[in-house]
Every structure is written in structure tokens, then in C-alpha cells.
Amino acid sequence: MVFSSALIENAVNEFSRLPGIGKKTALRLVLHLLKQEPSQVQQFSDAIARMREQIRFCKDCHNVSDEETCSICSSHSRNRKVVCVVESIRDVMAIENTQQFNGLYHVLGGIISPLDGVGPDQLNIHSLVERTQQQGIEEVIMALNPTIEGDTTIYYLSRKLKELPVKITTIARGIAFGGELEYADEMTLARSISNRLPLESYVQQK
């Protein structure tokens, strides 16, 4: 791709670093911004810079937040005895979009994957155990992607929590094995949450 401007080329290169954005799409975005008023482009860049500088992670669940505690954890209308364990922030958004879950969340920040060099110590597991102990959690729902890595993580978490007086469940297999929560349609995901199974039943199905 030949550019007549080094400034345009640099902007295209930066946009193309984003996931799912190729050089052609990046060029289209840059040329779109070029047509906007300078004040609009400044507002766009300020919003991105401010987000990156000021974003925080909830001290309880590790979800993104503007404050020390996210809006979900600080809400008095949520069921504070049920925690849904997810891999990423995107999974929180996917489940929230179903409007079928009224408990709290815990974002692991990944799943155990030795091939990718991700072990238990790199995930938010210790804080989950502490939280379950200290906050009187009665049910922990494992809402992890139904993959080998997801199942490995569920097994590890169940071992860490087995001495605690907590019910451990997992989402029903409305999500196909190998699928990802964030790409599941809202109805399927809602049913998987509503029809969750005791962990023992999930293990027996495998």
C-alpha cells in the first residue's frame, strides 16, 4: 500500500494494530477521520486517551470500572450470595446482555493453559477463594468456555473451593463444546445460566 503522506501511513499503521482491523479497513477509518472537523477528531482521541489513563479494575470482581468498586458490585439490587466466574470482561458483558442473571461476577483474567504459559498463579483465583470465604458466598457458577482449557480451570477451581461451604454449579451445555460465551446468542446463553447444573452432573456428562 503506497501512501502520499507519512502522517496518513503512520495513522493507518496504528489502526491496523487493533484486532480484526486490516490495512484497508484502517485506511478507511483514517480517511473518515480526515473528513471530520478537527474538534471531533480531538474529542475522539481524548476519549481513548482518557479511557486508558483513568480506567480502573474493581477491587472485588476485577471487572472494568470508573471507581474502586464497579457498578455491579456496588449495586444493592444484586444477589450478593451468588458469584458467576468468567474468563474475561467480555463474558460479563455477554451475560449482562441476557438480563437473566442478578448475582455478582468474578473475572479470572484468563484460563489455565499450560501450552500458552498461563498457570493458576497468573489468574485471579486467590481473590476468588478469599471472597468466597469472607463474603459468605453460597453459590459459585462456573461460566467458562466449554473447552479443554475451560474444563481444566473449572476442575482446578473446584479443588480450591471444595473445603468451603459453597455450592458449585456450571452453566448448562447450551453452549457447544469449543464455543465461546461472547459469541453465543443471548437466548442460548440465558438458558445456559438459568438451567445451570451441579458440578458433579457436569463432570458425569463428559
Image (cartoon, grey):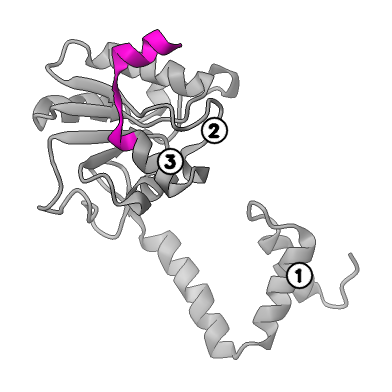
Instruction: Reply yes or no: does residue 30 show up in magenta.
Output: no
Q: Which residues are magenta?
A: 193-206
36 lies left or right of 77: right
Q: Earlier in the sequence, mark 3 or mark 2?
A: 2
Task: Identify the residue at horizontal 58%, vertical 24% (top origin).
Answer: 116
Instruction: Tell which of 42 and 24 is nearer to you.
Output: 24
Q: Residues within 10 Å of mark 3 (few under 14, many from 20)?
A: some
Q: Is residue 107 visible?
A: no
Residue under numbered circle 1: 27
125, above or below 186, in the image: above
| Residue at figure coordinates x 44%, y 60% from the top left | 52
Which residue in the protein does label 3 denote?
188
> Image quarter for residue 85?
top left
Q: Which residue is depicted at the point 22% across and 42% down?
A: 104
Location of mark 2 (residue): 179
Q: Residue 56: where, in percent of width, then height?
A: 32, 54
Say whether disc 3 or disc 1 marks the residue closer to the N-terminus: 1
What's the residue type where badge 1 is placed?
Leu
Q: Quadrant of residue 11?
A: bottom right
> Can you tell which mark lies on residue 81?
none
Instruction: Identify the mark nearer the N-term, 1 or 2.
Output: 1
Q: Where 70 sits versus 156, above or below?
A: below
Q: Secondary structure at mark 3?
A: helix
Q: Is 198 in the magenta?
A: yes
User: Could you say where residue 138 lies in the image, as x and y percent from the top left?
Assistant: 13, 27
